Amino acid sequence: MEFHVFDTYVKSKDGHTMHFDVITDKNNLQKAIEYAKQWLSSIGEDDAKVTSEECKFCHSQSMPEEIEIEIMTNGYFISKMEGCPN
């Protein structure tokens, strides 16, 4: 199954850039932005700006089974790249 990867760069409260991918089974930018906001809220970054400027479709690819399961359960998976909390 192909999953859709949205490359996302967001400024945190303390001003540094967080880079992460939103991975979902829906090729829908608005849904990816919604998922990014949900995740940011869960890490205390409720006020982070996420628009189509910060979150862009990158590519589609297959995913390992554990990521597929999380996407099927939660709708999305966040792949943390740089500047994201553990």
Image: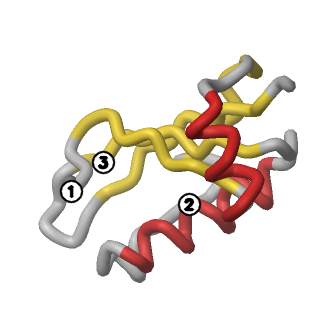
- Return the x and y of residue 27 as percentages of the image width and height: 86, 40
SS label for mark 2? helix
Q: Nearer the viewer, mark 2 or mark 1?
A: 1
Name the residue: 39% across, 53% down.
10
**In the depicted view, which residue is nearer to us: 84 or 1?**
1
Residue 49 against residue 24 in the figure, above or below: below
Rendered-image quadrant of the N terminus: top right
**Residue 43 placement, left or right of 2:** left
- Return the x and y of residue 38 as percentages of the image width and height: 55, 73
**In the depicted view, which residue is nearer to us: 3 or 7?**
3
The earlier-in-sequence mark between 2 and 3 is 3
Which residue has dot 3 on it?
A: 18
Name the residue: 33% across, 34% down.
81
Q: Which mark is residue 37?
A: none
State which quadrant residue 41 falls in. bottom left
SS label for mark 1? loop
- Return the x and y of residue 23 as percentages of the image width and height: 64, 41
Question: Badge 1: few (under 14), some or many (20 or more) residues near its Cα, within 10 Å?
Answer: few
Q: Which mark is residue 36?
A: 2
Which residue has dot 1 on it?
A: 85
Which residue type does callout 2 highlight? Ala
The earlier-in-sequence mark between 2 and 1 is 2
- Kindly report the distance in space between the C-alpha atoms of the residues bearing marks 3 and 1: 9 Å
Name the residue: 25% across, 36% down.
82
Which residue type does callout 1 highlight? Pro
- Kindly report the distance in space between the C-alpha atoms of the residues bearing marks 2 and 3: 11 Å
Answer yes or no: do the residues labelled 3 and 1 have beta carbons within 8 Å?
no
Question: Badge 2: few (under 14), some or many (20 or more) residues near its Cα, within 10 Å?
Answer: many
SS label for mark 3? strand
Residue 57 against residue 24 in the figure, above or below: above
- Kindly report the distance in space between the C-alpha atoms of the residues bearing marks 2 and 1: 14 Å
